[in-house]
Amino acid sequence: MNFVLDASVAMSWLLEDAGAHQAYADAVFEVLKRPSTQAHVPTTWGLEIANVIAKCQARGVLPENRAQAFLSTIDAVPVRCDPQTYSKALSETLQLARRYRLSSYDASYLELALRTALPLATLDADLSRATRKAGIKLFRVT
């Protein structure tokens, strides 16, 4: 099972701040433990993860040991970083960001999902709407 994984889902594994959607995020994590499952991410994914961790630590809401444990967890899940994100950034991704009024970061997940015809796992409401409008399925946990 393959799907595109938005950083919003992964960060909820660390911060557990997804409210009613936390069960979905946790279920996505469980799916990643299954054999032959792989999450696809744009090259900006790691930078988004690092940014949230750094900001949370700067605010004093994330202890170093918890951040390190999370990074070990992330290293253990099957994540494939897309090599074409950069080459699509100023063309397809920019067009999607404009069309759906998304950040370029969010549009990179949509571009990857469109190009690979994979469902997208996200907790971001704007990205979810854009995904549906673009004809891509949202990842459903089964």
Image (spheres, helix red, strand yellow):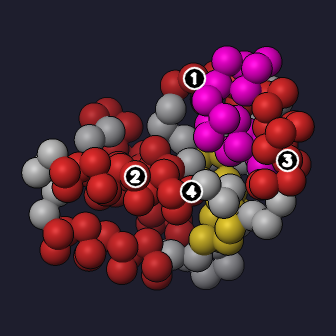
| Pointer 3 local density, CA inside 10 Å: few below 14, some 14–19, many at least 20 | some
Q: Tell me the quarter of the picture where residue 10 sits.
A: bottom left
Dominant SS of magenta comes to helix
Residue 130 belongs to magenta span: no
* Magenta residue span: 97-113
Q: Which numbered disc covers residue 88?
A: 3
Which numbered disc covers residue 126? 1
Q: Nearer the viewer, residue 95 or 30?
A: 95
Q: How many residues crowd mark 1 within 10 Å: few (<14), some (14–19), many (20+)?
A: some
Which residue corresponds to mark 2?
A: 51
First in sequence: mark 3 vs mark 4: 4
The stretch drawn in magenta includes residue 99? yes
Q: CA distance from mark 3 to mark 4?
A: 15 Å
Residue at the spot 50% in from the left edge and 32% down from the top edge: 124
User: In the rendering, at what x and y percent does residue 35 appear?
Assistant: 61, 81
Residue 93 vertical placement versus 52 (above, below)? above
For the N terminus, the quadrant is bottom right
